Amino acid sequence: MKSYVNLTSPLKVGALTLRNRIEAGPSNTGNGTVEGFLTPESMAYFELKAKGGAAIVTIGESNVHTKTGVAHGRMPCLDNPDILPSLVRTTEAIKRHGAYASIQLLHPGRRANAAYYDGVVYGPSAGPALFGSPIVEMNEDVIEEVVNAFGDAAEMAKLGGCDMCMIHGAHGWLLHQFLSPLNNQRTDRFGGSLENRARISLMVIDNIRKKCGPDFPIEFRLSGSEHVEGGLTIDDMVAFSQMIDDKVDLIHVSSCTFHNPATNTHMFPSAFHERGINVPLAAAIKKAVKTPVAVVGGLNDPEMMEEIIASGKADIVALGRGLLADPYLPKKINSGKAHDITPCQRCLICLSGDFVPYIKYPIRSLRCAVNPHIGREQEIKFHMPVEAHRKVLVVGGGPAGMQAAITAADRGHEVVLCEKKDHLGGLIEFADHVPFKEDLQKFRELLIRRVEERDIQVMLSTEITPEKAQELKPDVIIAALGAAPLIPNIPGWDHPKVVLSTDIYSKDQCIGDNVVIVGGGLVGCEEALNLCQQGKRVTVLEARPDVVIDGAYLYREALLLELDKWPVNILTNTSCKAITDEGVIMMDLEGKEELIECDTVILATGLKAKRQEVDALRGSAPEFYAIGDCLKARKVMEAVRGGYDAAMTL
């Protein structure tokens, strides 16, 4: 059994002793009340992280002064005492499991959003409007008012049961705006030198310390680099960290700025970034200060986290999405079950649903591709126990079928899992061949291992017909048969050079050096990137005006940025008229045709549900459910949730 002695060791942070080195980084559910109060759903969300073993659980972006700026709707509001009842219940829920409760203090500054705020938009310097009125330079009276608001908010948080607080001085919010030469062009004592630009942050720290005392730890979140030309560098932030070294109890290292939206997918690292992307920044700051240092950024691998602590690059690892994928990650590490940690896919579904102002409609409900509990934490407490143990036949060994089998077995049912192929995995087996899908490969292997560890009868190379189903005499059938490729009505679709997107890796296909992909959705563009990285020439044809419109907002942005680094030829508003011996005849919106010569044509035009096969099984058991792609072509998140939900209803 691997021992993670450094990761699981206690740490002194101010007056507190942490039970391990894992912090649940600041996040919110988005489903607070209109007034900015916490709801039972959000309380359950934070409680689950504490129950899973994190040492600190941090409530995310909480507004300190709604009078001078609001960035999002339903943000926790620490300038209204009416938040206290819900805040007390939330912090009590966190602390009953042995974690410390923290909260992130934020002022949006120039990023105040007119959709939620109709007052003056303040920033360190004047400028054109971003999301509302033009930006007005804060005078010293307003600066003093906001500084006091930070202190009062921390005082409110302490009264509400928080053990500590986090000052948000990163990512392009107000304090970061003052720090950054990209936003701060002042010539008074709050502008010019780094010392002057840091002045308001030091005033905020001092105000909080004065009002909350020495035994209320202060964590300061900063961007170790803005990764923008002319912006803050690691040298600047090392110098700033030395300024706050004897004033705060924990320095929290992130990176990037909303000043340049292109850095969003670096701020929230996607699958195209290395894990631990901010560790070098944290290590540089750690060498320069005595204060403990926390680092965030795509972390959830225990080996890496242990090495970060052991080597002295940081004292704490902060996890955001990693604790959505598996809130019990800390406990699993501590109990020798690290092999059972559900890997975060860094697919950014969780963040994209509420990423205002970049999306049109926030859903205000967290989702996770690999954890069906997220967004429904409160419901877990009220699931009815199994009244009668039944025989459950799960047909299909993809992610939906495996999750259904695992959940049904965990609830005590007798489970038979049948798969037509000679192995489990379904369509996500393609991940074995795509380097940037390593996390999906790990998830597939984890599901297979969980199936093998349970008392589940697995029947491979077994096609379930109505007759075969009746032989097994199940009480319940859960059909997870998957989907078939959608074949477009294109002359030549059956040409020898044509490969279906579902068959690229499941057969001994020979993909030529010159490839045309018909379909610019998520599957088509990911495959275009993968093939281009292998040295092939790739053209993508998409009939719609844009590509990857089926991708989560932040992941789509990351994929498009990655595609820009490679010579992938993407043609939108362009359809495939025919496939010939020479290649593909394309047609634009004006009806102009052109031949694109190629060796291979990949059809990535979608999937269709296997409705006939599903309907044939409906009468083979007293109770029947259809889930996953065989209900409707969908993504891993819907497959996993569908499998979990079906099994939980039994």
Image: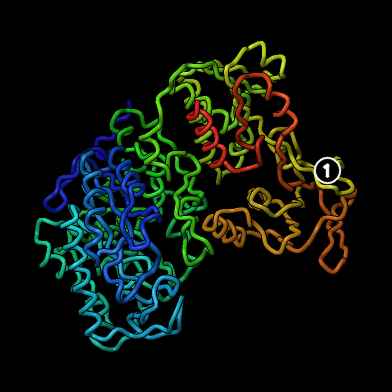
Compared to 101, does 610 lie above or below? above
Q: Name the quadrant containing residue 85.
A: bottom left
Q: Name the quadrant containing residue 181.
A: bottom left
Q: Nearer the viewer, residue 148 or 15?
A: 148
Give the side of residue 519 with respect to residue 391, left or right: right
Relative image position of residue 319 (x, y in whole percent): 35, 48
The scheme the figure's colours follow is rainbow
Label 1 element class: loop
Q: Residue furthest top?
A: 471
Number of marks present in the image shown = 1
Relative image position of residue 449 (x, y in whole percent): 48, 25
Compared to 125, does 235 lie above or below? above
Compared to 518, does 107 lie above or below? below
Give the side of residue 145 with respect to residue 131, left or right: left
For badge 1, the amino acid type reads Lys
Q: Nearer the viewer, residue 483 or 523?
A: 483
**Residue plotted at (52% across, 63% down):** 359
Compared to 325, does 161 lie above or below? below
Give the side of residue 489 with respect to residue 313, left or right: right
Q: Nearer the viewer, residue 241 or 351?
A: 351
Q: Name the quadrant containing residue 630.
A: top right
Residue identified by numbered label 1: 497
Is residue 290 among what the camera can see?
no
Relative image position of residue 577 (x, y in whole percent): 86, 55
**Residue plotted at (34% across, 80% down):** 122
- Classify the position of the N terminus by image quarter: top left
**Residue plotted at (66% across, 59% down):** 547
Is residue 411 among what the camera can see?
yes
**Residue plotted at (32% across, 81% down):** 124
